[in-house]
Image (spheres, grey):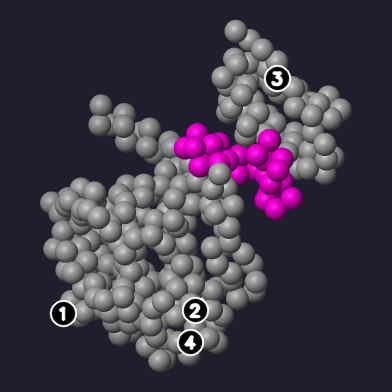
Amino acid sequence: MIIEKTIELQDLQDTMALCGVRDENLEYMREKFGVGIRLFGSNLTIIGEQQQCDRVAEVIETLMSKARSNNINRNFIDFVTDMIDAGDSDKFDELTRTVAMTIKGKPIKCKTYGQAAYVKAINDNPIVFGVGPAGTGKTYLAVALAVVAFKNKLVDKIILTRPAVEAGEKLGFLPGDLGAKVDPYLRPLYDALQEMFGLETYNKLMEKGVIEIAPLAYMRGRTLSGAFIILDEAQNTTGEQMKMFLTRMGEGSKIVVTGDTTQIDLPNNKASGLVEAVSILEGVKGIAVVNLTAKDIVRHPLVQAIVNAYEKHGKTKEN
């Protein structure tokens, strides 16, 4: 049964934020929810099935209540919808609070419900696997939380590592010593840390060994205590490397493992240590696995479309 549900919008500025430029937010919600949405004066009318109208009304009322403190766009509409669908609307302030601040004072917040679940998992568990496509903020948010933990004296050092598998045989052809050779593969980690600490502080902490960025091979034989440890691009580890890394964990440490299982650069006869670890360890107390999806991509909207297209193509090839 088709009904009409009307919401009275009290504030003009908030209403403009809800509608978006040229009503692009209203158009997105019409398409997303499959309902009619009509704005006349201060009255917004939703036209559709009762259950869907009630759902859309709850989303719109939540958006209006938070319009002053958040930028309403497609990502934020999806965030609020996913949160309501998961029954977490009472946790809105917790899930959307500032995670960290850059050196320039820019607040870092979760932009999707998946990111909020990821941040919560890192705060609540000693070991977290963040698995998802490029652009979902896996590494950036992990680095931000590592910096917060260090500044709050919860850890004594930050260790970031990546396998250099994608370098393969080409590593020897790059100029410089081993450090210079692996630098290109660790650059995203450098950039994120410098944005959090500032270049001067970052360099001082590097000199003191408080921040350590190294290839995964350098972890063998060590016990990593009192550290926030991030293993990035973990899809390119072997099963043996992943086991070696996870068993380096010492007292007072936290480990975050990030990777994209659609971008594995290992030889065909090698299974990914990330895929294997998630399968073996999911459900173990103290270990959380968070699967981010194309919905959590916060780069250019085309990135989400590209990921979706490749996923569709991959499923077609499998069939």
Q: What residue is disc 4 on?
A: 203
Q: CA distance from mark 4 to mark 2?
A: 16 Å
Q: Residue furthest top?
A: 1
Relative depth, front residue between 151 and 295: 151
Give the amino acid type for the residue marked by disc 2 in the picture: Lys
Q: What residue is disc 1 on?
A: 221
Whichever of labels 4 and 2 marks the residue nearer the N terminus, that label is: 2
Relative depth, front residue between 281 and 209: 281
User: What span is colored magenta in the figure?
Assistant: 61-89
The quadrant holding residue 49 is top right
What element does badge 4 sit on?
Answer: helix
Q: Is residue 102 above or below residue 180?
A: above
Quick one: quadrant of the N terminus?
Answer: top right
Q: What residue is disc 2 on?
A: 151
Cβ atoms at labels 3 and 2 below 8 Å apart:
no
Whichever of labels 1 and 3 marks the residue nearer the N terminus, that label is: 3
Q: Is residue 113 left or right of residue 228?
A: right
Whichever of labels 1 and 2 marks the residue nearer the N terminus, that label is: 2
Label 3 vs label 4, nearer the camera:
3
**Residue at image location 41% in from the left, 76% down from the top:** 154
**Residue at image location 46% in from the left, 67% down from the top:** 145
What element does badge 3 sit on?
Answer: strand
What element does badge 1 sit on?
Answer: loop
Q: What residue is disc 3 on?
A: 5
Coordinates of residue 47 in the picture (x, y in percent): 68, 17
Whichever of labels 1 and 4 marks the residue nearer the N terminus, that label is: 4
Relative depth, front residue between 74 and 120: 120
Coordinates of residue 319 in the picture (x, y in percent): 25, 27
Q: CA distance from mark 3 to mark 4?
A: 58 Å
